[in-house]
């Protein structure tokens, strides 16, 4: 008898956002066609053939909307326009058409939690206490002697409340004071943002990555967040991590909003709703919503946030697989514009192992631009830092600029990215780390990514097949991906030292089809498998 779970899994297995691979472009840094040192939409169009060759299925663009750029586009002043730096609406339509004509998908960043302080909604809201849009944002009176409404802190450092002289109230901003939070309890706000979604969906975009989804609703009583026990910070530091943000984020009512967004998405064929959510697994999976009514893909950031340790990662994979709702589709992210690049976090040699893990686990993978050539964080001198997170907390070394530098296309002075000095500097390693060179080198990182993506595209077992863990120890991690016709064993050495693969119960025999060391491709293996440090293998098993 067919169980409900079997039926749901079968129904779900063929959707593009399940079988495909997502590639994140940070538009300022991908390709500059206009010659001002900042990437743009026309530039992205010029590089679509590369993305198609690479083998990705969907492009996600970080925000391209009009913005004062206090937070590089995550402070939006018009949700239905294109920033002139990036081009025009005609350029966008051209890009969307070109992406679709290559059989690929395009998803946009939706930033519903906050607007720019220059957005007309906020300008109205702050103009007077009785303005009809006053309640579109989170305003609150001062306490005695001007006290703040509560102890909430901004993610970018300092208090999360800003005093407005004109109307004599505070407003709340989870990020910069130039990014006031919308009041999502207000039905007019809900409707306005759903209209924004309709606007882009009608145009034909294939979905959204929703910024800080878990922040969208705050505690109705605005209660104080508790202090994290044994915090390394002092209360006076005003560092966000000093508190456990139990009242300012992840409120039960947020799921109603996510459901609303999903209902809008559902009105169009084949679109996807992705949520940016940094939460522990058991909370993360609640964003799939009751009966799959929430996000299709609550972003899973464990490979970004966990220490690079085989035991911890093996455990996290199992915990995630175990916590997923029966019909919830998994996903994995290895890099994004907010985190250090993978090649800097885990090192150059482990970056290949990480790529193999990302592209063989069960679930939709997201690749961050440039990781496919092994770009590392670029050291940015203090006086060139532009990221507000870095500028506000200079002692913490958490500027995001190093992971946002221009794509390295070739070894020329400006990396083939621009004819002009780029907005962020390029590294000296440019000579070796660039697309042009690596495309010709069968042992390069790019060739490795290409082979992994090609294999994944050809093998449904790697896209939607079952996942079974088979082995893990202090160095190695191994699992099987299989469907009715094919069976693959993936063995990864997450350490620099040689390690033995010693499964206890099963016996394995097969042929190596992808390896971090190309010399081993084609060799046969059996149970007594010894891996070099930093080695990863995909083995086609005999059935
Ligand atoms: C999350 C985005 O990824 C990050 O870049 C941004 O600074 C914050 N949201 C605020 O919008």
Image (cartoon, rainbow, N blue to C red):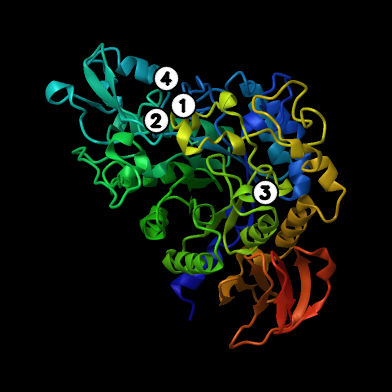
- Could you tell me which secondary element the residue under label 4 belongs to? loop
Q: Residue at x 36, y 15 (%)?
A: 123
**In terms of sequence position, does the residue under pointer 1 or pointer 2 come before the other?**
1
Please provide percent x and percent y for residue 140.
Answer: 21, 26
With respect to residue 290, does 428 lie above or below?
Answer: above
**In terms of sequence position, does the residue under pointer 1 or pointer 3 come before the other?**
3
The residue beneath circle 3 is: 57
- Could you tell me which secondary element the residue under label 2 belongs to? loop
With respect to residue 528, does 407 lie above or below?
Answer: above
Label disc, if present, on residue 119 of the rendered structure: 4
Work out whether residue 530 or residue 209 is closer to the camera in this orientation and state it: 530
Mark 3 to mark 4: distance in Å? 33 Å
Q: Is mark 2 within 8 Å of ligand 1?
A: yes
Q: Is mark 1 within 8 Å of ligand 1?
A: yes
Crowding near pointer 3: few (<14 within 10 Å), some, many (20+)? many
**In terms of sequence position, does the residue under pointer 1 or pointer 4 come before the other?**
1
**In terms of sequence position, does the residue under pointer 3 or pointer 2 come before the other?**
3
* Labels 1 & 2 near each other (Cβ < 8 A): yes
Please provide percent x and percent y for residue 116.
Answer: 43, 23
């Amino acid at each position: 008898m067919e169980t409900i779970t079997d039926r749901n899994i079968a129904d779900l297995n063929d959707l593009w956002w399940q079988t495909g691979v997502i590639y994140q472009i940070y538009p300022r840094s991908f390709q500059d066609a206009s010659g001002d040192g900042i990437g743009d939409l026309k530039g992205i169009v010029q590089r679509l053939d590369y993305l198609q060759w690479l083998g990705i299925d969907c492009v996600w663009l970080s925000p391209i909307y009009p913005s004062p750029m206090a937070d590089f586009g995550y402070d939006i002043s018009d949700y239905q326009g294109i920033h002139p730096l990036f081009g025009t609406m005609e350029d966008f339509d051209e890009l969307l058409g070109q992406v679709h004509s290559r059989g690929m998908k395009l998803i946009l960043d939706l930033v519903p939690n906050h607007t720019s302080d220059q957005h007309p909604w906020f300008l109205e809201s702050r103009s007077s206490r009785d303005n009809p849009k006053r309640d579109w944002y989170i305003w609150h009176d001062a306490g005695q002697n001007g006290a703040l409404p509560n102890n909430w802190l901004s993610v970018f450092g300092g208090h999360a409340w800003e005093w407005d002289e004109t109307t004599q109230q505070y407003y709340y901003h989870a990020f910069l004071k130039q990014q006031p939070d919308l009041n999502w309890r207000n039905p007019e706000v809900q409707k306005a943002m759903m209209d924004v979604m309709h606007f882009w969906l009608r145009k034909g975009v294939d979905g959204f990555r929703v910024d800080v989804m878990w922040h969208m609703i705050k505690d109705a009583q605005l209660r104080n967040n508790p202090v994290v026990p044994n915090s390394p910070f002092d209360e006076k530091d005003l560092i966000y991590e000093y508190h456990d943000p139990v009242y300012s984020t992840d409120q039960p009512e947020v799921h109603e909003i996510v459901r609303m967004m999903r209902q809008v998405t559902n009105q169009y064929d084949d679109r996807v709703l992705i949520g940016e959510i940094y939460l522990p697994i058991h909370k993360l999976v609640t964003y799939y919503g009751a009966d799959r009514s929430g996000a299709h893909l609550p972003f899973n950031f464990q490979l970004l946030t966990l220490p690079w340790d085989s035991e911890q990662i093996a455990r996290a994979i199992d915990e995630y697989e175990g916590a997923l709702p029966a019909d919830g589709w998994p996903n994995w992210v290895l890099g994004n514009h907010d985190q250090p690049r993978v090649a800097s976090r885990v090192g150059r040699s482990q970056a290949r192992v990480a790529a193999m893990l990302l592209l063989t686990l069960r679930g939709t993978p997201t690749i961050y631009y440039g990781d496919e050539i092994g770009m590392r964080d670029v050291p940015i001198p203090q006086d060139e830092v532009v990221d507000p997170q870095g500028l506000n907390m200079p002692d913490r070394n958490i500027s995001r600029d190093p992971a946002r530098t221009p794509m390295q296309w070739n070894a020329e002075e400006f990396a083939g990215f621009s004819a002009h000095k780029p907005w962020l500097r390029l590294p000296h390693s440019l000579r070796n780390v660039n697309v042009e060179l690596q495309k010709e080198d069968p042992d390069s990182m790019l060739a490795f990514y290409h082979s992994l993506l090609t294999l994944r595209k050809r093998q449904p077992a790697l896209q939607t097949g079952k996942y079974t863990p088979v082995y893990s120890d202090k160095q190695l991690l191994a699992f099987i991906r299989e469907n009715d016709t094919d069976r693959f064993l993936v063995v990864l050495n997450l350490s620099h030292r040689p390690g033995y693969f010693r499964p206890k119960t099963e016996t394995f025999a097969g042929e190596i089809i992808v390896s971090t060391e190309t010399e081993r491709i084609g060799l046969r293996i059996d149970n007594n498998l010894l891996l070099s440090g930093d080695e990863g293998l995909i083995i086609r098993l005999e059935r």
